[in-house]
Amino acid sequence: MERKGKKEGILERTIQALDIPGEAAGLARVEITGRHEVRMSNHRGILAYGTEEILVSGGKLIVKIKGEDLVLRAMTAEELLITGIIGSVELE
């Protein structure tokens, strides 16, 4: 597992050194629009789903969206849209 961590560190350093956008390297991108919409690209799938909390795999991190009346409005292999009253978005 250490090798994987080293590879990810090299990837991150290379992206920063070359000033490459993270999305181009396959890293997750999260966009929050006001209190009612979260869009995510380059996701790796839904880990948990409920009206008050949704967990999404971003590959190396987990995105936790908390709020009220959360709905997975749209999802493709690359992007997803969550609507509702967004209380917080946490990266773990």
Image: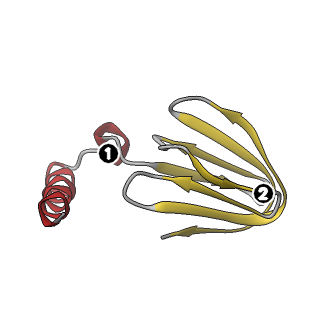
- Asked whether the residues under the numbered discs 1 and 2 touch, taking CB atoms below 8 Å apart as contact, a structural biologist would say no
Upstream in sequence: badge 1 or badge 2? 1
Q: Kindly identify the amino acid type of the residue bearing the numbered disc 1.
A: Pro
Q: Is residue 58 left or right of residue 54?
A: left
Identified at 44% across, 48% down, the residue is 28
- Disc number for residue 64: none
Give the residue type that dot 2 points to.
Answer: Gly
- Crowding at label 1, few (<14), some or many (≥20) Cα neighbours within 10 Å? few
Name the residue at 46% across, 52% down.
Answer: 58
x and y percent of residue 61 in the render? 43, 61
Looking at the picture, how far across and down is residue 18, in whole percent?
A: 15, 48
The quarter holding residue 73 reads top right
Q: Which residue is mark 2?
A: 50
Position of residue 24 relative to residue 82, above or below, is: above
Q: Nearer the viewer, mark 1 or mark 2?
A: 2
**Number of the label disc, if any, that sits on residue 21:** 1
